[in-house]
Image (cartoon, rainbow, N blue to C red):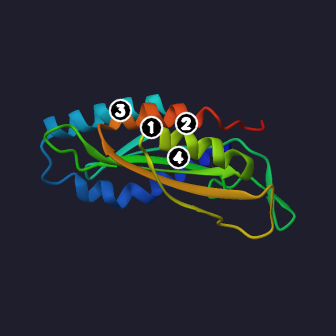
Amino acid sequence: MSNQERLKRQIDEMLEVQNARQRRGRRHGRKDDCRNLCDRFAAILHAEPDETNGVCVAARTRDLEASIMGRETNSPLVFPQFFSFEGMDNNGNALNLGETVILQHEINPFVERLVKQNIQVTAIHNHWLFDDPRLMYIHFQSVEPPLEFAKKTAAALSVLKDDK
């Protein structure tokens, strides 16, 4: 099973309960509009879409080779890329969030691309100890139309190169 398939399965399981709650009381037209926008958002980012409770999450994994504590890993917890939007206002602006695993040498060019496009970098940190190569995780955000955020993010992601 690939990292992408594992991540999709975990997201599906994690959101199953939320989806059950969501089914009550939603207007179909608004839900369809949000799902359509979510699909477009995810397509720009080459990710898998999921829309729950008005939150669009687009997820994918990086295809990197790494080990933790001397053991090879293919865990989707290690290689995630998540992008989301929610809370669209009347002007079409939404809260947009992103997170990706990133290699140390990719941090500066990636951050530079985000900042030049007015996307705020909010955190850079590690998740694991004794990982090789050193894996870092970066969080970023903006308030703007979701498809604009997706295009800007996709442009920044172009500096990241997968191993496989």
- Which mark, residue 8? 4
- Which mark, residue 136? none
* The N terminus lies in quadrant: top right
Q: Secondary structure at mark 1?
A: loop
* Cα–Cα span, label 1 and label 4: 29 Å
- Which mark, residue 117? 1
Question: Mark 3 touching mark 4, by CB under 8 A?
Answer: no
Residue 127, can we see it? yes
Q: Amino acid at mark 3?
A: Leu
- According to the picture, the residue beneath numbered tag 3 turns out to be 147
Query: Which x, y percent locates residue 83?
Result: 45, 46
How many C-alpha atoms fall within 10 Å of the one at disc 3: few (<14), some, or many (≥20)?
many
Question: Mark 2 touching mark 1, by CB under 8 A?
Answer: yes
* Cα–Cα span, label 4 and label 2: 23 Å
Q: Amino acid at mark 1?
A: Gln
Tell me which numbered mark, 3 or 1, is placed earlier along the sequence: 1
Q: Amino acid at mark 2?
A: Ala
Q: Secondary structure at mark 3?
A: helix
Tell me which numbered mark, 2 or 1, is placed earlier along the sequence: 1
Tell me which numbered mark, 3 or 2, is placed earlier along the sequence: 3
Task: Residue at 43% x, 45% y: name it.
Answer: 119
Tell me which numbered mark, 3 or 4, is placed earlier along the sequence: 4
How many C-alpha atoms fall within 10 Å of the one at disc 2: few (<14), some, or many (≥20)?
some
Tell me which numbered mark, 1 or 4, is placed earlier along the sequence: 4
* Cα–Cα span, label 3 and label 2: 14 Å
Task: Residue at 49% x, 44% y: name it.
Answer: 115
Q: Secondary structure at mark 4?
A: helix
Q: Image check: 122 left or right of 145? A: right
* The C terminus lies in quadrant: top right
Query: Mark 4 or mark 2, which is nearer to you?
Result: 2
Query: Mark 3 or mark 4, which is nearer to you?
Result: 3
